[in-house]
Amino acid sequence: MDALQGFGELGMGSRLKRLSEHMMRESQLVYDEFNIDFDPYLFPTFKIIKNKNGVTNTEINNSLKTSQPATTQVINKLLKKELIILKEDKTDKRKKIVYLSKKGKDLVKNISPIWNSIEQIIKEYTTITSNSLIEHLNILEEKFNQKRFSDAIIEHIKMNTEKNNLEIVTYQDSYAKNFYDLNIEWLKTYFYVEPYDEEVLSNPDKYIINKDGHIFFAKLNNEIVGTVALMPMDKNNEFELTKMAVSPKHRGHKIGQQLMQNCIDFAREKNYDKLILYSNKILENAIYIYRKYGFIEIPMEKNSPYKRGDIKMKLKIQ
């Protein structure tokens, strides 16, 4: 058993310190992976200097709420790495103004995509519903145990910086197994497979394609990595956006959002009236994205096709 977790609120300070050190170590692994000579502990001061066109030690202290000795120590390390330069203040020669050096400016260009990915992954890991900070930390640490923080960041960076040929393609019989496998994996990961799921996923032609529905796939470097369907509903010209799934190793790279945008664009081209979707409120990231794309919550019917569904949303196309 984790002793610090057992201490409850009394172990709060130690938990936060351990979490901070863990994230610093993992961030260092990311920098090392991409041959970036940078220390995560230097980040706050370096970011302040980067954002200011000249800044004093005192201004850094006031911004970060750190001590003068701590700031001086970081400044000395940045000087040793030749990432900053010091200039005399024009009005008070006793003051030293800190600027990025050319090497520091070059580092910013190389490291910014990494910072963007770190920020994105932190958002994904920390989007949690909890009743207390301790519960929040418990869930967060469990997420770190399920997938290393550094691995998630590295995957995100590679997906967003390397050349990827992602294209959205339409259904072919040869993709039927991909449609089944991607959705079954997703359901087993987050919920369970209902009989209705098994029936539809096993017979996409019968329940979707032959009823004037559509299935789209995200194809990345000749590999099917995601899918989504538009399934006709009882009401004329309304379609259910359903069966969206992305392979585990490609999650967190906005592939699902690209599939969704494709469906919305397609619905507009076809002059559909509405798109409907069913979801579950525990999928907070997904609900956030649905709202971002304009879906609004509507009342759930009594005889919902999905037992796990507790939220119904619609997007008016016309």
Image: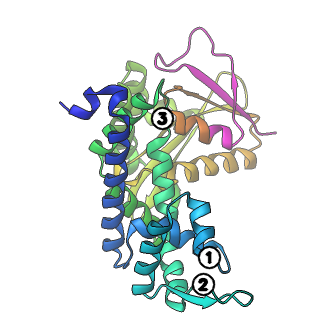
Q: Position of residue 161 (x, y in %)?
A: 47, 72
What residue did someone put label 3 on? 128
* Quarter in which the N terminus is drawn: top left
Whether residue 315 is in magenta: the answer is yes
What residue did someone put label 2 on? 96
Kindly check if marks 3 and 1 are in contact, taking CB atoms under 8 A apart as contact. no
Dot 3 or dot 2: first in sequence order is 2
Total count of labels: 3
Q: Magenta part of the protein: which range?
A: 290-318
Q: Residue furthest top?
A: 302
Real-space Cα separation, disc 3 to disc 1, in angstroms: 38 Å
Real-space Cα separation, disc 1 to disc 2, in angstroms: 6 Å
Q: What residue type is labelled 1?
A: Thr
Front one among 146 and 240? 146
Whether residue 314 is in magenta: the answer is yes
Front one among 259 and 287? 287
What residue did someone put label 1 on? 56
Q: In this view, does 237 lie to the left or right of 76?
A: right
Q: Which amino acid does label 3 sit on?
A: Ile
